[in-house]
Image: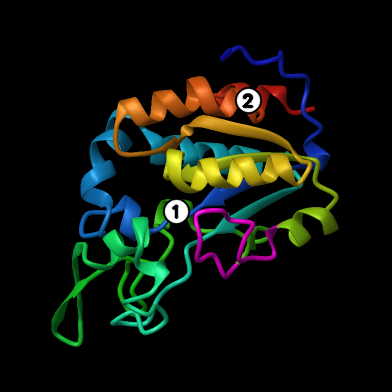
Amino acid sequence: MAVQNKMPKIDAKKTAIVLIEPQYDFLKPGGSMYQFIADQLEKRHVIENLADLVAKARKKVKKIIYIPFEAFEPGFPEIDKEGPGMGGLRGLEIDMPTGWTLHGKKVAGAWVAGTPGPEIIPELTPQKGDIIVRGKKTLDAFWSTALDYTLRVNMIEHVAIVGFHTNWCVESTARSAYDHGYRVIVIGDCTGTDTDEEQNYAEKYIFPKIGHVMGYKEFLKSLK
């Protein structure tokens, strides 16, 4: 049951691209999670695809919305080390080694303020007219941000989701967008995760039940 319905033409005036976490900690050497995703980024040309997509889509879609993960202060004082926030991915991220230093000391952990980790990479720098939605601290980009408000006040109907990681934040956000009543598109070749297995499973079995999966060139051609 992985077949998806044929995608109709997409009304560009009612479409937003939601770009999740295009930041150094994922996408550049030294980043806490780069070591896990680096091979997939290179093999699938994900950064190049994203850069081409946003450059060409800016003149077509209603909005391009960036959702970076919000930085933590050094030492992660925002999270009780004995609390539930340390479960799952967050607990793993806190101890990941990085290539960053702060005040002459090596930094461990993802998204540490004052390091390059939380910064958006140069290839995907937001441009005039783009929107940056702040506050993301969870896998689902809707949960701790004003993303839903931002989409609704811009009269968005189609949400095209791109970014990282495919089976973490992209999937969580796509599920939430569907539940919020949006038409969901996942642009597969503009997403990335750690392995082929994870990427392929999400594209084959998960996303077709939430919306539509397509490549970025097909997406651009489908805009009307």
| Quadrant that contains the C terminus | top right
| Residue 46 left/right relative to 180 | left
Residue drawn at 77 percent across, 19 percent down: 8
Please give the label number shown on residue 83: none
- Mark 2–mark 1 CB contact (< 8 Å): no
Horizontal placement of 209 versus 108: left or right? right
Residue 99 x/y as whole percent: 17, 65
In this orientation, which residue lies closer to the viewer: 221 or 211? Answer: 211
Q: Position of residue 5 (x, y in %)?
A: 70, 14
Q: Reading the chain from its start, which is encountered first: label 2 or label 1?
A: 1
What residue is drawn where x is 34% and y is 79%?
76
Quarter of image, res 14: top right
* Residue 12 in magenta stretch: no
Give the Cα distance between marks 2 and 1: 25 Å
* Structural crowding at the residue carrying mark 2, measured as other residues with C-alpha within 10 Å and reported as few (<14), some (14–19) or many (≥20): some
Residue 20, x across and y down, in percent: 52, 51
Residue at image coords 64%, 65%? 145
- Relative to 1, does residue 140 appear above or below in the rendering? below
For the image, the number of numbered tags is 2
The one of 136 and 77 positioned closer to us in this rendering: 77
218 horizontally vs 105: left or right: right
Residue indicated by mark 2: 209
Region of the chain picked out in magenta, as a range: 134-147
Which quarter of the figure has residue 108? bottom left
> Which residue reaches farthest bottom?
103
Residue under label 1: 22
- The amino acid type found where label 1 is placed reads Pro
